[in-house]
Image: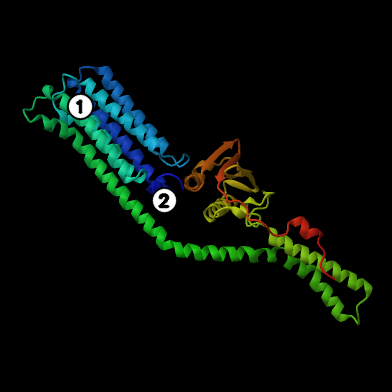
Amino acid sequence: MTGPLTAQRLDPLGGITARVLVAVAVAIAFAEAAAMSSVTADQISHPAFEAAALITIGVSGVYYVRATSPFRPAFSMRSHTVVYLLALAAVVFNSAAQWGSNAVVRDDWAPLTLATLTLTLGSYRPAREIALFSVLAATIVGALGLVQADTFRSDIPELVYAITPAAPILAAGVAAAAFSRSLVGSLLDWRSSAGAREASARLDAEQAEHAAPARASHLVHLDEQVIPFLQVVSRGTGLSEADGARARTLARELRALMLIDTERSWLERIVRRVDDPRRLAERMAGSERGFLRAVIAHLRHSEVFDDETLRLTLREEPAGCSVTVEVESRAGRNPRVHLAPYIAVAHSLFSAVDWQITGTTLTLVLAAGIPAPSPGGRATRGDALTEEAPR
C-alpha cells in the first residue's frame, strides 16, 4: 500500500459506498449553483463569467465522481487538487460575474458549493491535507469578499464580508478532517485486533495447501494401483520376478507423484491453467495471494464468467512480477458491475492495476512485488520424474 493512509486505502469497499454520497453531493452542489444563480440574476453584471462559473463547478463535480471510481487508482492528492482548483475557479468566476453589482455576500452560491464538495472528502484524503486545502480555500474566498466590500449594501464591518463566505468552507473542512481522522483510526484499530486471527487463518490455510495435493494425486494412485497390487500379492504363495519388477515400478511412480505434489504451487491447486515457469506465485505476499483466491473463486462461481476459460500467467518483471488473469464472459452479461469491488481492492494491494474487456474477454493485469528467491530450493518436476526410488 503506497501513499498516505486514507479510509479508501484501508477500506476500498467503503470507498465504493462513499462514492454514492459524492454523486449526491455533486448533484446538490450543481442544483445550489443553478438555483441561486437564477435567484440572484439581478446582481449579475457579466453573464459570461456566470456561465463559466456554472460550467466550471459542473466539470469539478464530474471529475470528482470519475476520480472516485473503483476502476481507477485511489483518489490521490493530485485529484484532490484538481477538484479544489476547479471549484475555486468557479468561486472566482462567480465573483467576477457580480463585480461591482454584488449586493449581498451571503447569497453567493460558489462558496457553498465548495463547502458541499468538501464535506465528502473525509473518505478519500487524510485529515491534515483536507484541513490545509480548506484553510487555503477559505483564505482566497475571504479575500474576494473583502475586496468587494464597497459594493455590498449592508453597513457592517468589512471583516464580516470576509468571514461570511469563508465560514462554510472552514466548517466543512473541519468536519471532513475530523471524520477522516476518526475513520482511519477506527480502521487501524480493527486491523490491529484482527491481526492475530489473520495470522492463525493464514497458518491453517498453508497447512491445508500442503495437505490437499495428496488427495489429488498420489492417494489416488495408491487406491487405483498400489493397493490392488498388494491385495493380489497377499493372496498368492510368493513373489515372482514379475511381481518384484512391478513393485519397483509402482514405488518409483509413487515417489515421483509425491515429489510433483510437493512442487505444485498454491495457485496450481486452485486453477487448472497456470503459466508460471519461474514459480513466482510461491513468492507473492499473503495479501496478494488472498486477493487472487477471492478473484478466482468469484470468476469460477459467477454466472457472468466461463470458468473453463480461466487462465493465469505470471511473468517476472524488474520490480516484481505481473499477474495476468484472462477469462471469457458469457453472452448478454455485464461484467463491470461484478468486478467493481475486486478492482477497488486490487488498487490498494498492487502497485499497478490494468484491466480491459475486449469483446467477451476480460483481461486483468496486476503488478505484484515479490522478494528475491532464497538460495537453494527443492527438487523440480523434471528431477522428480527422472529420479528413481532406491531398490
- Dot 2: what SS? helix
Check the image and name the residue furthest to the right. 241
Q: Tell how many labels.
A: 2
Find out whether the residues at labels 2 and 1 contact each other: C-beta distance under 8 Å. no
Labels 2 and 1: the sequence-earlier one: 2
Say which quarter of the image contains residue 125.
Answer: top left
What x and y, as percent, mark residue 170? 22, 39
Q: Residue furthest bottom?
A: 237
Q: Residue flagged by tag 1: what amino acid is it?
A: Leu
Secondary structure type for disc 1: helix
Q: Is residue 259 above or below residue 343?
A: below
Pointer 2 residue? 10
Task: Answer left or right for 107 relative to 33.
Answer: left
Task: Give amino acid for label 2.
Answer: Leu
Which residue in the rendered view is the most extreme toward the front? Answer: 375
Q: Point out residue 161 in the picture as x, y percentages from the top left corner.
A: 14, 30
Residue 17, placed above or below residue 141: below
Task: Point out residue 234 in the picture as x, y percentages from the top left corner.
Answer: 85, 80
Label disc, if present, on residue 144 of the rendered structure: 1
Apparent side of residue 79 relative to residue 321 in the rendered image (left or right): left
Residue 93: where, in percent of width, then height? Answer: 26, 23
3D distance between C-alphas at marks 2 and 1: 38 Å
Vertical order, 157 against 200 (above or below): above
Q: What is the residue that sits farthest to the left in this orientation? A: 155
The residue under the point 28% across, 41% down is 131
Quarter assignment of residue 367: top right
**Tag of residue 195:** none
Q: Residue 290: tell me if it is visible.
A: yes
Query: Which quarter of the figure has residue 269?
Result: bottom right
> Is 147 situated left or right of 274 in this image?
left
Residue at image coords 28%, 17%: 48
- For the C terminus, give its image quadrant: bottom right
